[in-house]
Image (cartoon, coloured by chain):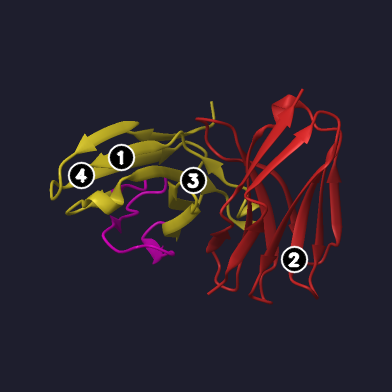
Chain colours: A red, B yellow
Amino acid sequence: GENVEQHPSTLSVQEGDSAVIKCTYSDSASNYFPWYKQELGKRPQLIIDIRSNVGEKKDQRIAVTLNKTAKHFSLHITETQPEDSAVYFCAAVGSTLGRLYFGRGTQLTVWP
Amino acid sequence: EAQVTQNPRYLITVTGKKLTVTCSQNMNHEYMSWYRQDPGLGLRQIYYSMNVEVTDKGDVPEGYKVSRKEKRNFPLILESPSPNQTSLYFCASSPQGTSLYEQYFGPGTRLTVT
C-alpha cells in the first residue's frame, strides 16, 4: 500500500514568516493530495488539495506544490498569523478508490 | 445545516463490552469513512464505504465492524473492545465524482476502554 511521510513533526515560526511542510509518498499511482488543518480540540478541515496533473496550486496565503518525479509535495504558508497555529496533515489517495493515507501531522506554532 | 454528526461524543467503557458509535450525514453523500487518531500516528483509516451496501477495509480494520444499510448512516461497531482501541474516532463523508475526497468530518468521539 501507500506510505506517506511528513516532516517536520513540529515547526515554530515568528508571525509574518513563511512555513513549509513536506510530505513524500511511495505509490506512483497516487493522484490526489489533500491537506487538512486541525485546530486544538476540533475536527480536521480540508484547506487545499492538488491533483497529479497540476504542479502548483495557490489559495491566498496557502500554496501546495507537487513533484511527481520525486514523489513529494509541500504546503507553503506565507505571512503566517497566530491563527495558523494548528496541526497540519498531508494525505495521498492511492490506486484504490476510496483509500486515503495520511502523514503523521505537523504541529505548527506561530509566535506573535 | 449541512453536517456530519457522531454519537456519543465521549465514552468510557470496559474491555469486552460491545459498543456502537453512530455516524450520520444529511448531505446525501455517497462516500463515508471512519478514522482513528492517535498521538504521533496521525489519522488512520479503519473502514470506508463508497455507497450503500459497499464497505471496504482501510489501514486498521481489526477489531471493528461497519455497516451501510442506508446512505445517511455509517455506524462503527466494536464487538469486544480492548484497551488498544482507546482513541479519538472521526467519521467523514463526501460526494462521489470529482469531489470524492473533499471530506466533511464529524466532531469526533473520544473512546476510552479500561
Q: Residue type at mark 2?
A: His
- Do callouts 2 and 4 point to residues on the same chain? no
* Residue B92: image tag: 3
* Residue A72: image tag: 2
Identify the element where label 2 is drawn: strand
Q: Residue at x 55, y 61 (%)?
A: A101
Judging by the rendered image, the residue that carries numbered circle 4 is: B19
State the image coordinates of residue B52 (x, y, percent, origin top left). Answer: 40, 56
Q: Earlier in the sequence, mark 1 or mark 4?
A: 4
Distance between mark 1 and mark 2 Cα atoms: 34 Å
* Residue reaching furthest to the top: A112
Indicate the chain on which mark 3 is placed. Answer: B
Q: Residue type at mark 1?
A: Leu
From the viewer's perspective, tell me whether residue B84 is left or right of residue B46. Answer: left
State the image coordinates of residue B110 (x, y, percent, origin top left). Answer: 35, 37
- Do callouts 1 and 4 point to residues on the same chain? yes
Identify whether B15 is placed above or below A82.
Answer: below
State the image coordinates of residue A110 (x, y, percent, origin top left). Answer: 73, 31
Q: Earlier in the sequence, mark 1 or mark 3?
A: 3
Mark 2 Cα shell of 10 Å, populated few (<14), some (14-19), many (≥20): some
Q: Residue type at mark 4?
A: Leu
> Of the residues tagged 2 and 3, which is closer to the observer?
2
Identify whether B98 is placed above or below A15.
Answer: below
Q: Earlier in the sequence, mark 3 or mark 4?
A: 4
Indicate the chain on which mark 1 is placed. Answer: B
Callouts 1 and 4 close, C-beta under 8 Å: yes
Chain part drawn in magenta: B52-76
Identify the element where label 3 is drawn: strand
